[in-house]
Image (cartoon, helix red, strand yellow):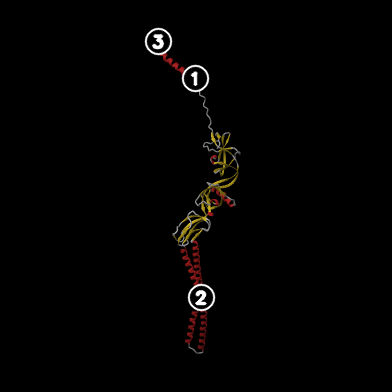
């Protein structure tokens, strides 16, 4: 009876022992994994050696082309437009006809002004003749007055001798009084001559001024180019009737083109001092399909704003193809720094820090931003840095850049 009980206990126990032995054997014979080695990540970066040299700082400015003498030619009188010789945007030479008004409309006021001058000249001649006649009349009346006075004295003498009557004396005195009034009238006529002559002369001067204006209107009725330029706009067409003062067309001289660029407030003091000292200030404009063109600064604007003050540059002959309203970006050339370092902006961190590469790791260095400079068509930063000549500078902008970060250089 006890044998079956032993079997029931021994078989499970044997199975457990065999399983444990198999586990121990398998554990002891399994292959061993090598320990995991944690490697530091290496960042690939581009670099350049530090090269210090005397360099001029540049500042990028944005400006608009303007004309300092945009002329609006207007109609001198109400007239008909007979010819328009140019079109909008067309260039012209000095002496070219631009627009003509109807000749008859211009000649009628001229003829009227000539007639007015002739009339006033005749009035002056007539007044001179009247003056001469009045002077002769005055002389005659004064002689008659002397006769009347002598007649009164003669009658008084006769009356004393009782050779005439009192009535005769009174009649003689009355005739004397009338003659005195006649002389006064003649004197007044002579004295009025000067005033009338002044009035007539003033009217003649006015008529001559109107004649001169009419002649000017005839000349201005044909708009002729005073210099080489370009038509900005044409406001009328052939056959239009325009009123006096109506704008006919607008044009500007090619030599009047200039660039108005906004100069930041921070740069105003330096630029103003350089201009006051008579120093030449230049800006470089780089054409899309050509080389750089130098523009010379001429003056600062008379008014400033919170964003800065406008700086005006002359447009050289090679850029006379530009139109008012064109937008340009130019690089204003600043002062020269004797020991400056030009770097792409990708090497600058926070405007005051760069990273150099030493023993395969980054090291932070403080810098001072001096300005900007164009290098091969790209805008680089010009900085002052206390680093050794030739040391490698990291050019790849890494968001996780810190001192000690391991890097390796790659060819750009």
Task: Determine which residue is flagged by label 1.
Answer: 29
Q: Quadrant of the C terminus?
A: top right
Task: Determine which residue is flagged by label 2.
Answer: 129
Dot 1 crowding, Cα within 10 Å, few <14, some 14–19, many 20+: few
Q: Between residue 318 and residue 122, name the one nearer to us.
A: 318
Q: Earlier in the sequence, mark 3 or mark 1?
A: 3
Q: Secondary structure at mark 1?
A: helix
Of the numbered discs in the image, which one, if any, rests on residue 138? Answer: none
Asked if residue 102 lies left or right of residue 385, the reply is: left
Task: Determine which residue is flagged by label 3.
Answer: 3
Q: Are marks 3 and 1 in contact (CB under 8 Å)?
A: no
Q: Between residue 224 and residue 60, name the one nearer to us.
A: 224
**For the residues marked 3 and 1, what is the alpha-carbon distance in whole angstroms?**
38 Å
> Is label 1 or label 2 in front?
2
Dot 3 crowding, Cα within 10 Å, few <14, some 14–19, many 20+: few
Q: Residue furthest top?
A: 1
**For the residues marked 2 and 3, what is the alpha-carbon distance in whole angstroms?**
182 Å
Dot 2 crowding, Cα within 10 Å, few <14, some 14–19, many 20+: few
Q: Is residue 26 above or below residue 301?
A: above
Q: Is residue 35 above or below residue 105?
A: above
Relative image position of residue 123 (x, y in whole percent): 49, 72
Q: Between residue 304 and residue 130, name the one nearer to us.
A: 130
Q: Earlier in the sequence, mark 1 or mark 2?
A: 1
Q: Is residue 63 above or below residue 182?
A: above
Q: Quadrant of the N terminus?
A: top left
């Amino acid at each position: 009876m006890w044998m079956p009980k032993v079997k029931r206990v021994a078989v499970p126990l044997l199975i457990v022992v065999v399983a444990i032995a198999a586990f121990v054997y398998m554990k002891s014979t399994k292959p061993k994994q090598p320990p995991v080695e944690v490697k530091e990540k290496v960042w690939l970066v581009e670099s350049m050696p530090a090269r210090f040299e005397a360099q001029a700082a540049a500042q990028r400015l944005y400006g608009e082309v303007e004309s300092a003498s945009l002329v609006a030619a207007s109609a001198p009188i109400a007239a008909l437009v007979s010819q328009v010789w140019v079109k909008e945007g067309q260039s012209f030479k000095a002496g070219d006809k631009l627009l003509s008004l109807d000749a008859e409309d211009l000649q009628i006021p001229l003829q009227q002004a000539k007639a007015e001058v002739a009339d006033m000249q005749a009035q002056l001649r007539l007044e001179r003749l009247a003056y001469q006649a009045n002077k002769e009349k005055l002389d005659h009346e004064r002689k008659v007055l002397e006769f009347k006075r002598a007649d009164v004295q003669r009658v008084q003498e006769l009356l004393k001798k009782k050779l005439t009557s009192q009535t005769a004396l009174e009649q003689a005195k009355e005739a004397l009084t009338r003659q005195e009034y006649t002389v006064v009238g003649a004197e007044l006529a002579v004295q009025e001559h000067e005033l009338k002559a002044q009035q007539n002369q003033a009217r003649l001067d006015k008529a001559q001024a109107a004649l001169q204006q009419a002649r000017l209107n005839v000349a201005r009725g044909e708009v002729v180019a005073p210099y080489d330029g370009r038509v900005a706009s044409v406001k009328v067409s052939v056959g239009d009737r325009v009123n006096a003062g109506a704008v006919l067309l607008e044009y500007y001289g090619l030599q009047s083109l200039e660039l108005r660029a906004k100069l930041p407030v921070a740069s105003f003091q330096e630029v103003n001092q350089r201009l006051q000292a008579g120093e030449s200030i230049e800006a470089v404009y780089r054409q899309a399909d050509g080389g750089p063109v130098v523009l010379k600064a001429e003056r600062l604007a008379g008014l400033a704003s919170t964003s800065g003050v406008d700086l005006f540059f002359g447009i050289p002959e090679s850029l006379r193809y530009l139109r008012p309203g064109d937008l340009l970006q130019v690089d204003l050339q600043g002062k020269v720094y004797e020991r400056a370092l030009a770097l792409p902006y990708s090497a600058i961190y926070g405007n005051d820090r760069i990273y150099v590469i030493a023993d395969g790791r980054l090291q932070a260095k403080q810098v001072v931003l001096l300005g900007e400079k164009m290098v091969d068509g790209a805008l680089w930063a010009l900085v002052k840095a206390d680093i050794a000549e030739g040391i490698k500078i990291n050019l790849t902008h890494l968001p996780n850049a810190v001192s000690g970060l391991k890097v390796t250089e790659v060819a750009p």
